[in-house]
């Protein structure tokens, strides 16, 4: 199955990074790692993509996933701001995917706040045979 951030075109499935490279042919796209936040068993990468006046940030559980997310967001920007049909093919359909963690990190960065802080907890309720495990995540964002 294809990744969420991949595009469906007549030639098959291609990643957002490759599609952006095709659209911006001859223009340099710079990807830079902004942060790598380590959680218990995984890392969240935040990558910044810049091409001329277009800027976007992407997040993911791998560097590749974060880069693809940044490229997808830049493609969305191009689609919204471009009236030139040569830049964005109207038959290309972007997958609908909302990265809430990435959006929150972009908001914090835009307002010059620290990145969000996450607190994880887990608990058990009930007797031995009817135990239910629950997990909670508390997120704090803003000027602390």
Image: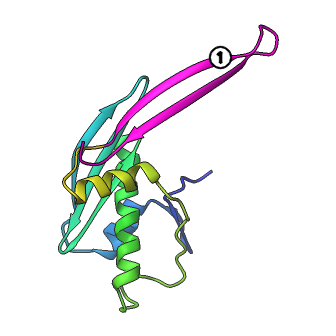
Q: Which residues are magenta?
A: 116-144
Would you say the magenta stretch is mainly helix, strand or loop? strand
Foreground of the two, 110 or 45: 110
- On screen, residue 71 above or below 143: below
Q: Is residue 39 magenta?
A: no
Can you say which quadrant of the picture contains the C terminus? top left
Residue found farthest to the top: 128
The residue closer to the viewer here, 16 or 47, is 47
- Image vertical order of residue 61 relative to residue 3, above or below: above
- Classify residue 34 as left or right of residue 58: left
Within the magenta stretch, is there residue 143? yes
User: Percent x, y for residue 118?
Assistant: 39, 34
Q: Position of residue 130 (x, y in %)?
A: 81, 15
The answer, for residue 18, to whether it is visible in the render is: no
What residue lies at 36% left-to-right and 74% top-to-bottom?
77
Residue 30 on image: x %, y % = 19, 59
Quadrant assignment, res 140: top left
| Outermost residue, front side | 144
Q: Is residue 96 left or right of residue 25?
A: right
Does 127 sit above or below residue 62?
above
Res 42 visible: yes
Residues 28 and 79: in front is 79
Residue annotated with mark 1: 124
């Amino acid at each position: 199955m294809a990744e969420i951030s991949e595009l469906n075109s007549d030639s098959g499935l291609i990643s957002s990074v490759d599609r952006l490279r095709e659209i911006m042919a001859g223009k340099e796209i710079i990807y830079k790692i902004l942060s790598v936040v380590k959680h218990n068993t995984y890392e969240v990468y935040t990558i910044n993509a810049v091409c001329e006046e277009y800027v976007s940030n992407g997040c993911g559980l791998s560097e590749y996933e974060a880069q693809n997310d940044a490229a997808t967001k830049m493609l969305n920007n191009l689609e919204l701001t471009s009236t030139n049909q040569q830049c964005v093919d109207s038959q290309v359909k972007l997958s609908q995917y909302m990265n809430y963690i990435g959006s929150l990190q972009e908001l914090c960065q835009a307002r010059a706040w620290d990145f969000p802080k996450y607190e994880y907890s887990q608990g058990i309720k009930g007797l031995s045979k009817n135990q239910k495990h629950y997990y909670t995540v508390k997120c704090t964002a803003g000027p602390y």
